[in-house]
Image (cartoon, coloured by chain):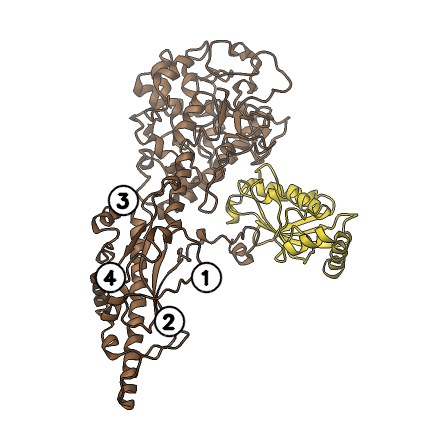
Chain colours: A brown, B yellow
Amino acid sequence: MGNQQSSTGGTPSSPGRSTPGHVSPSNQTDPTGPSSQLGAGSGHNINNSSISSSSSRPLAGGVSSLFGGRDRSGSTSSTIGRSKSNSVSLPSPPTPPGLIDGGHLHPQGLYSLRPAAQDYSHPVVKGLIIEKKLAPFYRGLEDYEDDWTDEQVGQGLREVRQAQAAQAEQEAADELANAAGTTMSLPTASGSSSSSSAIPATTTAGSIRKGLKIAVGGKDKKEEKERAAERERKETRAYKGAVECPICFLYYPPNINTSRCCEQPICTECFVQIKRAEATITHLESEPAACPYCMETDFGVIYEVQKIARPETLMATSPSSADNVVDPRADGQTPRRKSVSSKSKAVVTIDQIRPDWEDKLNAVKAQAARRASRRIIMHRVGDRLIPVGYTSSRTSVPGTDTGPITTEMTQEAFQQFMAAAAGGRGVRSGSVSGSPGSGGPRRSSRRGEREGVNDLEEMMLMEAMRLSMLEHEEQQKREAEAKRKAEQQQGSAGEPLTDASGFLQPRPASNTSSSASSMRNVGSVPGPQPGPSALGHVPHTGGLLAQPAESSPLSGTPITRSEVDVRQPQRPDLINLDSDAAIDPAAYRRN
Amino acid sequence: MSANLPKRILKETERLVADSPPGIEAHPHEDNLRYFDVKIDGPGGSAFEGGIFKLELFLPEDYPMAPPKVRFLTKIYHPNIDKLGRICLDILKDKWSPALQIRTVLLSVQALLGAPNPDDPLANDVAQHYKDDEKGAIAVSKEWTQKYAV
């Protein structure tokens, strides 16, 4: 923190310039490290003016403003001179700069710090913490007793910090293994020791990439120690009268958020984990989260910063100046607050910190719509089912679905396909052109819209079809061979014998000698039978719709067209087994 | 894995073992602290009275944000518990709340034994039996309790 001060020229009397240091996002910054970065510039009210306006409160100036001058709770002590000598000599990582009410702007590792587990909007949450509408992220104490001394609390916090560093190191290592290079662009990573840079950059990278980098050369180490000690005192003080978060079972300063409805405490780290149930392909709805305590819908919390216990001497700083924080308890300590509407300005709801929830829901709906209307079209040749294409909807919103598009192989495509199959080459999906019905250009334009994933699916599909073709061709060859032999022995051409069940179909040599020619017949089965638009929606009637093929010269051979729902059976998300209650012991023991 | 065990799970386990609710026992496996062996006494006055039912309980990775998975291991004739031991209980599904705990979940399961609800069945045949002939169904439940849970 001292670096910011000297580099920005922010003297104690110019809080407006120096305050950006408060929002330094890196809580593990080595105090001796040469650089730091700021969270400013992420576009969420983290700017000099908003901070300086509130930090220009009485008593809030001076060096203390660097350590969280916005803290009107009274912890804005200006006792720089005193320093706990033991705090710095301990092996634990130092208390980071930038405390807000003794807390932090980013999660402390209670839940996994992987980005997937921290999927709320970081800039929004940071902004809310700075605006004091949401409690900062505090370190949770494992234990706390009301008669604990500051020293005991301090010890507890140091232990938490050590554990954090270890965990962060672990996660950082995992992270490196997985996603090297994507997140390590933070400037602190270079200059500091491994343990101090251990909080994975991912936790904050999204919002602070653009953060300022302030490099400072030669600074006073002693001053730094004093500041670290001051920070630690400040943090420790916040935990007076700590309360247990009923969700993570850790102890936090008494001012942490409370539910808007039933006024139960909840730490910010647990709060940001509560979200709408995510829509799935089988459940296309996303209900707002209910209060975990009283099940009231539209969960929201209120942060009442003044609940922080403060030294008597600083009571004078209690907030009376204008502030945009709505405070239902400002006048008189009512024993219990009434339920506050989720629309109230003081309330932070779970939708507020995940502004993208609706987009996500729509994305799932779109995906479901695409899948629902996508089926493989099979042609039945004798006892064989030959996949010749698939249907797919180009529209994504169910209400505006204009019906699936049928993609089928034309004769030529089919021949190409067979030729490729015969040659043993992989068939590129591009070799399938549009059917006469859908038209080539339309299809290609649709291809352009699709994502890579779908292309991959398509290719796998084509590969499966190719293998099926190969097998079919082989079988036909064998049959033709057998037939020819039989004919030679009998010496008569004979009528095609067709088993009633459609199983064995001896064919005239003219038709079976070339599999391509017989395939052509298959491929030429025109679309009008089950209309393409019906394919995606008509419930299956027994799975196989046996229909004689009018164009086949092999009147005895049933060439049927049917559709088989193949809905990618290997995708577990599509199999609704309702297996949540079932426990697979093997899976558990893996852990 | 257990190195990353959330403090909540450790604390919950401690409290559960130290002070378990009457008629309920839960012990974590030594090699997997997320996996519990559970025993629940059939509630007095119910068809399951006198039985001691074994269950397994697993705390998934995202517990407590996701509900624990609970399953009966002892065979039981109950309209809301199927033959695989799966339990139809709203708090184990969409009504889960992270403020609930292993303790409260097991108490709810115990309460479910005392109050079968054939209108929201998981085992359809049992539920139908309970609806058509409650006395007969209760007799079967008692019989199964004697046969499998004593």
CB contact under 8 Å: marks 4 and 3: no
Q: Give the CA separation, mark 4 to mark 3.
A: 21 Å
Q: Which residue bears the numbered disc 3? A: A449
Three-letter residue code for mark 2 = Asp
Q: Earlier in the sequence, mark 3 or mark 1?
A: 3
Q: Is residue A495 visible from the viewing direction of this image?
A: yes
A477 with respect to B132 (left or right): left
* Image mark 1: chain: A
Label of residue A542 in the image = 1
Identify the secondary structure beneath mark 1.
loop
* Image mark 3: chain: A
* Image mark 4: chain: A
The spot of residue A68 in percent (x, y) is 44, 20
Q: Which residue bears the numbered disc 4? A: A427
Q: Which residue bears the numbered disc 2? A: A383
Q: Residues within 10 Å of mark 2 (few under 14, many from 20)?
A: some
